[in-house]
Image (cartoon, grey):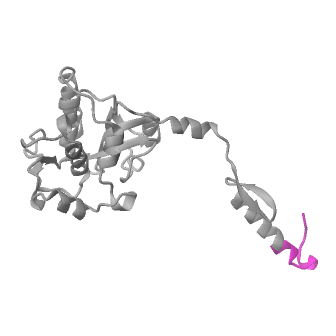
Amino acid sequence: MDYLKIALLLLSYTLTSLCGTISIPSFQKLLYHYPGYKHYGGRFSHRRIIDIIGCNKTDLLHDTSALRISFAFNKIGSVYSIGYEPIHLSKYGKDSVSGRDNLQYLFHPLAFGPYMADKYGYPSISVLHDKDPIATKRKFWGKQGIMEIITYTKFGNKPKGHIALWNCDRLFQTKDWISKHTLLTIQFWESPDSNCDFLVNRKRSRSKVAGTWRTVKFDTLRVKPVKKLSRFNEIIDGVPNRHLKFRH
């Protein structure tokens, strides 16, 4: 099956890339330069990011996740730039396109994992053929980095790749490709400055009083139930006793 071939390809790259590699860029730099999806908290539609890069549209896929991470790499520059040489890593032959700046931009998500393994070494975490999306997310809780997500089609189990930034407890400014799939392969490269201390502090802190309602202080987690109960009592008080079988 295709997904087994993809898994073996990823493993072969991780095993042959243990030496002579560098760490991935700072996560803060990735966040700063990443062109997020317009409908997921970012500012860039598919068309807009392609226009900014200035590449040949005929070679591209509908999925622009690889282009977006490539854009961030090239903006950070230095050793992290994709470079000027075309990338050929997947069975499709051509995995990158030239932008207006003559730099290469990987556009095929399935080639991004092997590229990452070849340049940055083996992943910090690898998940092969996991069937529980919730348990899968827990494995990356409290970490920041770059994630390659491979999902599989319902018919034929054909692999589809997606590249994204993982920010502590969720994917950053992109579609959640994990939650709605029951078969997942994930490769994750953790950033050297990974820091999710705010999650621990948020978990330990109790909810705070957010204001008052009818001179009574309310908790942000309980304000809606309190309002609903009060509204229910108002309705009951307005109904004549003869129409009520009981009153509390």
Q: Where, quadrant-wise, is the C terminus in this rendering? A: bottom right
Q: For residue 149: magenta?
A: no
> Picture quarter containing residue 15?
top left
| Residue at image location 32% in from the left, 45% down from the top | 164
- Asked whether, in this view, residue 186 is left or right of residue 107, the answer is right
Q: Where, quadrant-wise, is the N terminus in this rendering? A: top left
Query: What is the x, y in percent for residue 216?
Result: 81, 59
In this view of the protein, which residue sits in the foreground, 92 or 115?
115
- Asked whether, in this view, residue 213 is left or right of residue 1, the answer is right
Task: Report the span colored magenta.
Answer: 235-248
Query: What is the x, y in percent for residue 52?
Result: 19, 60
| Residue at image location 89% in from the left, 74% down from the top | 244
| Residue at image location 51% in from the left, 35% down from the top | 197
Q: Is residue 189 above or below residue 150?
A: above
Query: What is the x, y in percent for residue 103?
Result: 11, 47
Labels in figure, total: 0
Q: Residue furthest top?
A: 19
Q: Residue furthest right?
A: 242
Residue 229 appears in the figure: yes
